[in-house]
Image (spheres, helix red, strand yellow):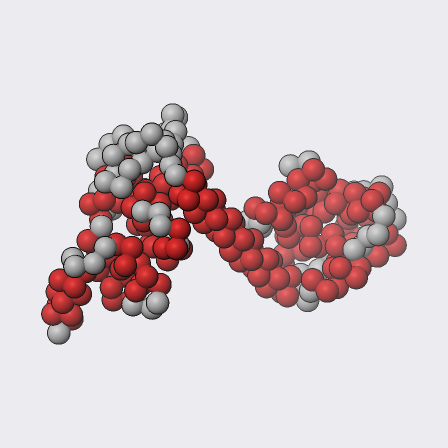
């Protein structure tokens, strides 16, 4: 029964453009999404291979990145702009694969050519609509990642019986007080003993910290929640929060 369904979907798919299929998928046709992903694997392999400069197998991490990127491109594609989804998805796949390669340091020399035609061959330049679509996609992706990171941090704080509301209310009001608190947090994460205590007990080892910093115990206690929060950001995978604090954290 499943094979028959896939066959019928595949037969129907051939009568429609990828843009039309994308609209159906965005409207919730998940079986059709699976068929399209399977059918466009050769396109994904070719696109990923053009970045990696080698033949790509489905078992390769780069192929998985490309498949996910193609999946995202279909879901985020805006048909109202009249842009070719092949051109749009090709740009997204190449960007995501290059980001992965650079992050993992797998290749020394990787660059992206942002010029493609509908059939996958290189052309002169992307249209304005294509550029805008890619920029909107990137902005939405970043917004989603920021949202996910904040939710993750919120859950992390909850383990320490903290909340964003408390942090807003009790964060140091003066710049020098914030800088002192950040320095204390850096002291905590740079000390195995202090950090282990914080993680195991889920509270700040105030007495131990007092011996290693030049501020009073009263000051540490007053900024306890803020210090814990900064410490969690420093040891966690919080790219955007760390970037926001980078100038002050000196990391």
**Left or right, 164 with reference to 70:** right
Mark yes or no: residue 130 visible.
Answer: yes
Residue 53 image offset from top left, x and y in percent: 27, 30
Displayed quadrant of residue 123:
top left
Report the front residue among 79 and 21.
79
Q: Which residue reaches farthest top?
A: 109
Residue at 20 percent across and 58 percent down: it is 16
Quadrant in which the N terminus is drawn = bottom left
Query: At 31% across and 36% down in the image, what residue appears?
Result: 116
Estimate the x, y position of residue 29 in percent, counting from the top left: 29, 68
Q: Position of residue 91 (x, y in %)?
A: 36, 41
- The quadrant holding residue 128 is top left
- Name the residue rendered at 54%, 53% in the picture: 143
- The answer to whether 11 is drawn above or below residue 180 in the figure is below
Residue 159 in percent (x, y) is at 62, 65
Q: Is residue 45 left or right of residue 209?
A: left
> Quadrant where the C terminus lies?
top right
């Amino acid at each position: 029964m499943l094979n028959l369904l896939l066959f019928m979907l595949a037969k129907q798919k051939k009568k429609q453009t990828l843009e039309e299929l994308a609209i159906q998928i965005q409207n919730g046709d998940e079986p059709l999404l699976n068929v399209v992903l399977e059918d466009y694997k050769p396109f994904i392999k070719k696109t990923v291979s053009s970045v990696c400069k080698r033949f790509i197998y489905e078992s390769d991490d780069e192929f998985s990145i490309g498949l996910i990127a193609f999946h995202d491109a279909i879901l985020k594609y805006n048909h109202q702009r009249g842009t070719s989804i092949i051109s749009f998805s090709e740009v997204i796949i190449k960007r995501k694969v290059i980001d992965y390669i650079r992050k993992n340091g797998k290749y020394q020399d990787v660059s992206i050519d942002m010029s493609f035609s509908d059939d996958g061959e290189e052309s002169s330049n992307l249209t304005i609509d294509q550029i805008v679509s890619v920029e909107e996609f990137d902005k939405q992706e970043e917004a989603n990642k920021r949202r996910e990171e904040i939710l993750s941090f919120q859950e992390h704080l909850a383990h320490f019986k903290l909340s964003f509301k408390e942090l807003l209310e009790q964060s140091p009001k003066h710049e020098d007080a914030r800088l002192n608190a950040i320095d204390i947090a850096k002291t905590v994460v740079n000390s195995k003993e202090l950090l282990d205590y914080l993680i195991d007990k889920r509270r700040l080892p105030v007495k131990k910290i007092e011996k290693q910093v030049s501020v009073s115990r009263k000051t540490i206690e007053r900024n306890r929640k803020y210090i814990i929060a900064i410490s969690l950001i420093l040891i966690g995978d919080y790219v955007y929060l760390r970037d926001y604090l980078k100038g002050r954290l000196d990391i």
